[in-house]
Amino acid sequence: MGDAENQTSFNESEMLLMGILGNDNNVVMADAVMICNSSGTVLSVHDTYEHFFGVSKAYVVGKSVYELEEEGIFTPSVTRMVIEKQQRIVTTQRNKTGTLILTTGIPIFDDQNTLRYVVCLNAMDVLQLENIKKKYNELKFVLDQKNEEVAALRQRYLQPTNMQFRSPNMVSMWECAMQFAATRANILITGETGVGKSLIAKEIHFASRCASGPFVEINCATLHESLIESELFGYERGAFTGANITGKLGKIELADKGTLFLDEIGELPLSAQAKLLDVIQNKTLERVSGNKKIPVDFRLITATNRDLMEAVEKGTFRKDLYYRLNVAHLQIPPLRERKADIVILADLFLKRFNTEYEKHATYSPQFIDFLEQYSWPGNVRELENLIERMVITTTTNTIDVEYLPIDVVKQMDIIPYHTRKASLPEMMDEYEKRIILNSIRRYRTTVAVARDLGISQGTVSRKISKYFGDDPAVLQSITDD
């Protein structure tokens, strides 16, 4: 083969090679490349070929791979194998020193499916590959362990078993809660009634170093003022009339080596506030009618729906106690500001109550719309109670807005269901119709419905006639007055 022919063949094969080793994400990585024609003559090799096979580029170009194989430059010849089998070959070659080289032989055919060129891609030697594989496996093992640890931490901290949320403000609050849980700092949880302050306190406890200890909860608002001190600090025998003859441990002592959660801390009277402050500062307490200092060690979490700073300004809450309690502060957003969590929580409650009451209820699309639009003044607690109520009272397997309790309907600032094409009077009629139907289903008599809705019995009868006519399903729901 003449020089001109070789040069022409090389240029063509180089262009073909660029198609294989393109600049896209599927590029075949190789440290050395050899290009041969269909007869096995070497047309070109990469500059690094000498590093792999111990021969210069000038020595190899123009020679036959059969000749090079006989000389032991490489064994076996991958180009020869591709020519013989007319297919892609991936195997290992040995160079003159016996080093194994991973080589890929690629056949290149013309439009008539005739072999024109063979491109051999020589990667690093097998020993290097084995070392890299070993390193990779070692790193993968370490990474898998780290991933397992991270998954365990996420399971423990970011995906609590008793809580479900995905709204950004709840995620942010939860991340802060878990940061606080890792410390011994006193935590003050604030938020409206029903947002889940108690549940958050429990999750903090189980995520903390106090998790193996007790979780002792007391609601300061439910205790009579005269009993708060004895409940918190305990009492010695004979402390007061009716006291246990052996005395009693207080909640604080019971929380030793664990967590004490004081809910509605804003209801704590000033006298008890002073004693609680002393316990926090000195880590000791005295029982009622006692004279002995008892050491205690507990994690303190408090919660309130009141503005404690306002109470401080009014003189109903000690300023020094406020700052002791408010070392770490968590503000739980109300459910109306957590729209992304509403349906998640509703589904969670539905599954629980379906199981509890052996039902198979589902939500209608209109009911889901209601869930997302309602203001939820009672927060998560109201949502939970409503779902339980709906599962119990709904007579079909589909929970719909028409079965909503009247007390909920009265609070709604939206019409729960209507078509966009309806006029305002039509929507108002539909809204009134649903309110009356719901009241009929609840109270059964026109007298009771009139009392429930604050209208006359005659008006109720006229509304029933207007909206339901002779509908037997509705008329059968009304008993004799």
Image (cartoon, helix red, strand yellow):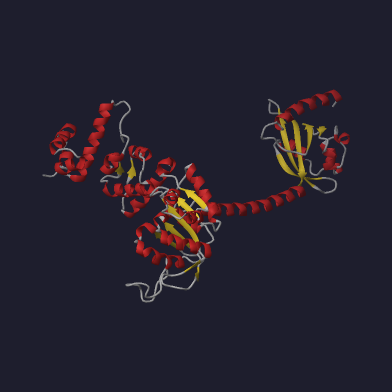
Q: Quadrant of residue 275?
A: bottom left
- 332 is higher (above) or lower (below) than 412: below
- Which quarter of the rendering shows the N terminus? top right
- 379 is higher (above) or lower (below) than 268: above
Side (left or right) of 224 relative to 82: left
Q: Position of residue 286 (x, y in %)?
A: 46, 69
Nearest to the observer: residue 168 or residue 92: 168
Nearest to the observer: residue 328 or residue 104: 328
Q: Position of residue 475 (x, y in %)?
A: 15, 39
Q: Residue at x 34, y 61 (%)?
A: 224
Q: Position of residue 90 (x, y in %)?
A: 71, 42
Res 115 visible: no
Q: Quadrant of residue 89?
A: top right
Q: Quadrant of residue 104?
A: top right
Number of marks in picture? 0
Res 46 visible: yes
